[in-house]
Amino acid sequence: MTDPQTMPHSPDEPDGVMFEHVRSGLRASVTVESIGSSFPDDGQAIAITVRAAHPPDGDMATAMMLKVDWQAPNDFDEGAALLGAGRIEVEEAFRGHGIGTLAAAVAIEWLRSLPSVPLSNIILAPEDATEDNIARRRRFYEKMGIRFSWVEEGVEGQATRMATHDLVANLSSWLER
């Protein structure tokens, strides 16, 4: 296993399992692979897969997959980064265990290893807001430093504009818990 201190996963590093970690009744492994970018020119992308077992001695299952896209700035465009390709979702059995925070921390570490570009707009839709996830999804984004202009507090909103280097990665705190 790769030591988590070797973060971030740079485009020059080989794909594969970055690390496996056990904490608070959960075993998780993170795999990062380079994939094709959604951006036509000067783009890079990774796919982060978190597999987990709860309890730790149980069978591993895919808990979350997260695609992260980055486009270099050029003479005509300031570049962009896309977190989650429009959707960030943890499998229901693993919600509330920090899986989303873990995947986001890996994504942010990777984005911060590249030149800073604007983060593409994040919109929280009311149809995705349920009574049991409103507080959880709000905490998830706030841990990354993302703030929202709310149409309806906690239910529907749009992220305020920010650059990738302003995102906050909490990988070390996730590993310490």
Image: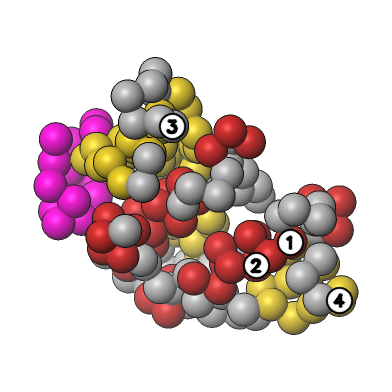
SS at mark 2?
Answer: helix
Chain part drawn in magenta: 1-18
Of pointers 4 and 3, the one earlier in the residue sequence: 3
Estimate the x, y position of residue 41 in percent, counting from the top left.
45, 51
Estimate the x, y position of residue 136 in percent, counting from the top left.
63, 60
Of tags 1 and 4, which is closer to the observer? Answer: 1
Kind of residue sitting beneath label 2: Arg
- Which residue is under mark 1? 134
SS at mark 4?
Answer: strand
Q: Is residue 42 visible?
A: no
Spatial separation of the CA atoms under disc 1 and disc 4: 14 Å
Res. 26 image quadrant: top left
Spatial separation of the CA atoms under disc 3 and disc 2: 24 Å
| Horizontal side of residue 85 vs 18, given as left or right | right
CB-based contact (under 8 Å), mark 1 and mark 3: no
- Which residue is under mark 2? 138
Viewer-proximal residue, 20 or 105? Answer: 20
- Which residue is under mark 4? 151
- Which residue is under mark 3? 54
Kind of residue sitting beneath label 4: Val
Estimate the x, y position of residue 44 in percent, counting from the top left.
38, 49
The answer to whether 142 is drawn above or below residue 69 in the figure is below
Spatial separation of the CA atoms under disc 1 and disc 3: 23 Å
